[in-house]
Image (cartoon, grey):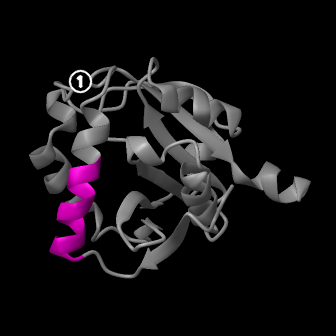
Amino acid sequence: MNTELFRIERLTALDEAILQQMADIYVEAYAEPPYNAGPLWDREAFLARTRRQRDRDGFQLELARSGSGDLIGFAFGFTMPADGWWAGSTTEPPPAVQAARKFAFIELVVQRRWRGNGIGRALHDTILNTRLEPYAILTALAEAPARAMYERWGWIQIGSEQHTTDSPLLDSLVLDRTQQRSAD
């Protein structure tokens, strides 16, 4: 990882100007196959979801900036309370995951031309290394390259989810952070 190419920056508040820059990167990434800019991944859907999510308990946002300061990627999530789970879910989580507070890892997006430089992994690890929740959860499209990347990073599929009626079926993944901490 060449950290001279980029830096990670934590924001404590997400203002509208940064949100619009994030949306530009998001729309570019989700125009690619297998997403193909479907309704779940259009700009307005992203903006509406993110405006709601930024007010959630434990919201954390990490930005990746190029050496010249341009926004080139981001990752964010929030704390999902004990007994909380995805909206519209189709698979119940394991009881231990359900009963615990969880970090819902919502987005990890890097501009196409910056991929392959360790930026996604740096964003992922920066967030997770600061979280106290025993589990992290996310959903991913099975055929997306990111899905295989999460598996390489230790995430395990525990079911499938369909967040809304117009959403595709997504794999539900968990990262058991208690196992990670005991291995450190």
Residue 138 is situated, as x and y percent measured from the top left of the image, at 48, 42
Residue 75 is situated, as x and y percent measured from the top left of the image, at 44, 57
Q: Which residues are magenta?
A: 15-25
Label 1 belongs to which residue?
Answer: 36
Position of 89 with respect to 155 (left or right) is left
Q: Is residue 58 visible?
A: yes
Q: Is residue 92 visible?
A: no
Residue 47 is situated, as x and y percent measured from the top left of the image, at 16, 55
Q: Is residue 123 above or below residue 40?
A: below
Is residue 70 or residue 33 the one in the foreground?
A: 70
Is residue 168 or residue 27 the one in the foreground?
A: 27
* Residue sitting at the far left: 44
Write down the quadrant of residue 34 in the picture: top left
Q: Is residue 132 above or below residue 95?
A: below
Residue beneath the point at 23% across and 26% down: 167
Residue beneath the point at 54% across and 59% down: 123
Is residue 60 or residue 178 the one in the foreground?
A: 60
* Residue sitting at the far right: 183
Residue beneath the point at 64% across and 31% down: 151
Residue beneath the point at 81% across and 59% down: 181
Q: Amino acid at mark 1?
A: Asn
Queried whether the magenta region covers residue 17, the answer comes back as yes
